[in-house]
Image: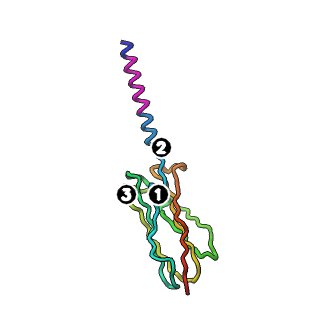
Amino acid sequence: MNKKYSIVRSIFLSFLMLSACGIKERAEVQYTSKEFPLSIELDKTEYKIGDMLSFTLTIANKCGKTVTLYSNGKMPCVDFQNLKNRLPHSDISALSSQELKENEKLSRNFNFQLEEAGTYILATHYIIAINSSNTENWFEEKLDDIEITVAP
């Protein structure tokens, strides 16, 4: 009887360890910006004073499953400034979360009335975490800066 108990116990402990490893592995899934690509819809880069610069930024969920996305509630975001007097960008706000289904897109529309001639930089990015707001889960995606020209 002790030998049967020992075999059953060994099998049970082995199963328990394998299960625990599987749970740990699933809990530590690390997502990357490649699974949540950022894109922009922008028609042109040359404008005149009085024009409206309008564009859409989109984060797409390409990871293959529904996730909880954590951010400051204002993602994706943009920094649009005149090249002559560019200032550091900061946006402090409260943590928020939302469900993002498989293949779903999170989009924001932006509109800027162009009132001064010059060269501007349109910088776009996001900083998000997936399924956990722990510090080590945050990652960023940034598109190349886009130069916008506004003529008189």
**Residues tagged 1 and 3 counted as in contact (Cβ below 8 A):** no
Which residue bears the numbered disc 3? 103
Q: Quadrant of residue 8?
A: top left
Which of label 2 and label 3 is nearer to you?
Answer: 3
Q: Earlier in the sequence, mark 1 or mark 3?
A: 1
**Element at badge 1?**
strand
Q: Amino acid at mark 2?
A: Glu
Is the Cβ of the residue at disc 1 closer than 8 Å to that at disc 2? no
Mark 3: secondary structure:
loop
- The residue at the point 58 percent across, 74 percent down is 81
Dot 1 alpha-carbon crowd within 10 angstroms: few under 14, some 14 to 19, many 20 or more: few
Does label 2 or label 3 sit earlier along the sequence? Answer: 2
Say which quadrant the C terminus sits in.
bottom right
Q: Give the x, y percent position of residue 6.
A: 40, 17
Closer mark to the observer between disc 1 and disc 2: 2
- 10 left or right of 138 in image: left
Q: Name the residue rendered at 41%, 33% in the picture.
A: 19
Quadrant housing the N terminus: top left
Q: Nearer the viewer, residue 17 or 47?
A: 47
Is residue 94 one of those drawn in magenta? no
Between 46 and 25, the residue placed more toward the observer is 46
Tell me the CA gap for discs 1 and 3.
21 Å
1 or 2: tag closer to the N-terminus: 2
From the image, tell me which residue sits under label 1.
96
Residue type of the residue flagged with mark 3: Asn
Residue segment shown in magenta? 5-18
Mark seen at residue 28: 2
Question: Is residue 77 shown left or right of residue 65?
Answer: right
